[in-house]
Image (cartoon, grey):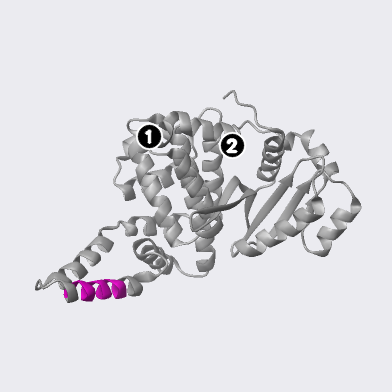
Amino acid sequence: MTNQPIKGAIAEEALRNYFLSIGYYVARGVKFTFRRFDVTDVDLWLYARNSPMSRERICVDIKNKKTPQALERIFWAKGLQAVLGLDSCIVATTDSRPDVRDFGLQHNVKVLDGKFLTRLTKSARSHKERITEEDFLADLDSSSLGRLGGDWRGRYEESKSRLLHSLNFDGCNAWLDDIEYLLAQIASNNQAWRLLYASCSHFMIAMDFILREFIAEDQEQRRQIIERGIRYGVSGQEFTEKVGRMAAALVESVAAQPGLASTLQHEIRQQASNVKADLLAEFFAKNLSGSSSFDVALALEAAAFSPQVPTPSALPAQVQSVIGVLADFCGIDRKIALA
């Protein structure tokens, strides 16, 4: 861990630590993509659990420069908030002019000005026993041999990006694919723990965001909702079966093979039934009520960025339970997953 972050990265890390210290979940350098094009990076993405039914998602734009162009950054942050459908936005700038703060207030943009940043760099809240994002990425590259070893860095960047647009069951299923891959890596490569913890934390944020809508449902109703979501995704069972019928009809129209269409429909149903969605549904409906999902996400994120990566046995019991049930879902021996 010898690479020193550049000045802008230092400001981003300081603000990240500040927001972590006041209870936010924070992801840094989140890529916003559109049809495989990298559009921009979100400097910080904040997530807060304000109440059982209310969540807050915020983008933070940070400019630690001599000529920060603060008024332009307010326009930029406000536009980014609108495009991403977030709840609010913040601009952090070295500019300390009152006009900048006033302009931000007029347009519902919080401004953290130069005076705040100066105080922050002297505050204990800007310093935590964590590795930086740059060190995290370097560790992923060295642990996986870059693209030759599974492109862990690429998986991590995609995982973060889902926080912007896929806090739903489709996103959860993509994270579960990542988690299954990483749990399988653990047996031969202990360096995978960092990325596994980060991916699990993203998954838990998505579950927390989803479950806020069903806080008033009883346990059995929540279980059914989660099971259907994990098994069939956002579109649901009806849509999956409709696509299956359409595919079967198409196959039947081009292949003169009796019974092929019904075989295809049976295979689609079999694939869905093979997903162990009931394991996750039972666990999340029963064990992760209240703020538990959010608390577990925070603990996993902290473990991912710890200078010395802890083993699951050193983590809180509730975090171990989550890793255990994810291992069961993925068909991985708990003895390996909870080493």
173 or 114, nearer to the observer: 114
**Residue position marked by numbered label 1 in the rendering:** 149
Q: Is residue 62 left or right of residue 57?
A: right
Give the image location of residue 172, x and y in percent: 43, 56
Q: Quadrant of the C terminus?
A: top left
Are there few (<14), some (14-19), or many (20+) residues within 10 Å of tag 1? Answer: few
Inspect this view and state whether residue 225 appears: yes
- Tag 1 secondary structure: helix
Asked whether 247 falls inside the magenta stretch, the response is: yes
**Residue position marked by numbered label 2 in the rendering:** 133
Give the image location of residue 334, x and y in percent: 33, 40
- Tag 2 secondary structure: helix
Label 1–label 2 contact, CB within 8 A: no
What is the three-letter code of the residue carrying label 2?
Answer: Glu
Task: Give the magenta-colored segment's residue range.
Answer: 241-252
Q: Residue at x 44, y 39 (%)?
A: 152
